[in-house]
């Protein structure tokens, strides 16, 4: 399966029609523990085993960055990623790209983004900002998302 398919498999647990996605509630429902640490130079790390799932996220991130990092790390848990030991440390570029694609689809579902993109077509200068606020993600994350989805010509 593709990363987006893994993200979409979680839609049954969330309300994609009314963003923002409640990532903390989703993690709780999936028995994924979330903790913060005073990381510098590292956004997050995942530990997973058959008995335990933990995401540790940097306390230095903004709320929006923290949400994306949690969704990214959740991707490592949901997808069949393997690493040395039981934790993911970001050295495998292919797995990191997959986790980013997973996080983007989970926090900014394509169907909802397209629907709201059309809804705000009368305000083209502020569309990305409005959607970033609606989905509770950073401007950069939303800008990247609409670019990848081909909604805006650059």
Image (cartoon, rainbow, N blue to C red):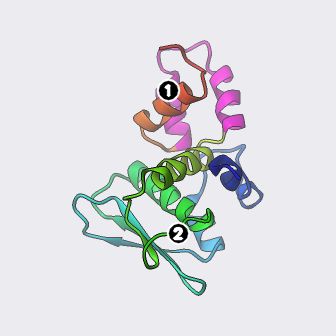
Choose top left, top right, bottom left or bottom right for residue 131. Answer: top right
Density class for disc 2 (Cα within 10 Å; few <14, some 14-19, many ≥20) is some
Identify residue for label 1: 128
Q: CA distance from mark 1 to mark 2?
A: 35 Å
Q: Nearer the viewer, mark 1 or mark 2?
A: 2
Q: Is residue 131 above or below residue 122?
A: below
Q: Position of residue 92 (x, y in %)?
A: 42, 57
Picture disc at residue 82? 2
Locate residue 15, reporting x and y percent: 72, 52
Q: Residue at x 70, y 47 (%)?
A: 16
Q: Nearer the viewer, residue 57 or 63?
A: 57
**Picture layout, residue 37 above or below residue 58:** below
Q: Nearer the viewer, residue 37 or 6?
A: 6
> Residue drawn 61% across and 50% down?
106
Q: Nearer the viewer, residue 39 or 78?
A: 78
Binning the other alpha carbons within 10 Å of mark 1 as few (below 14), some (14 to 19) or many (20 upward) gives many
Q: Secondary structure at mark 2?
A: loop
Report whether 140 appears left or right of 120: left
**Residue 136 magenta:** no
Residue 30 image position (x, y, % from top left) = 64, 72
- In this view, the residue farthest toward the left is 40
Give the numbered dot on residue 25: none
Which residue range is magenta in the image?
A: 110-135
Residue at image point 50% right, 44% down: 136
- Relative to 86, residue 7 above or below: above
Q: Main secondary structure of the magenta part?
A: helix
Q: Earlier in the sequence, mark 1 or mark 2?
A: 2
The verdict on residue 113 being magenta is yes
Q: Is residue 5 left or right of residue 137?
A: right
């Amino acid at each position: 399966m593709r990363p987006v398919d893994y993200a979409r498999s979680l839609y049954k647990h969330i309300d994609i029609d009314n963003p923002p996605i409640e990532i903390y509630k989703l993690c709780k429902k999936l028995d994924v523990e979330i903790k913060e640490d005073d990381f510098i130079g590292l956004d997050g790390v995942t530990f997973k085993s058959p008995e335990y799932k933990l995401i540790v996220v940097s306390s230095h991130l903004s709320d929006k960055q923290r949400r994306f990092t949690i969704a990214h790390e959740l991707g490592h848990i949901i997808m069949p990623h393997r690493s040395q030991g039981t934790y993911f440390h970001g050295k495998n570029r292919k797995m990191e790209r997959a986790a980013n694609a997973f996080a983007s689809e989970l926090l900014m579902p394509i169907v909802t983004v397209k629907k709201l993109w059309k809804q705000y077509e009368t305000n083209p200068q502020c569309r990305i900002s409005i959607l970033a606020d609606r989905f509770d993600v950073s401007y950069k994350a939303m800008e990247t998302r609409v670019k990848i989805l081909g909604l805006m010509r650059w």
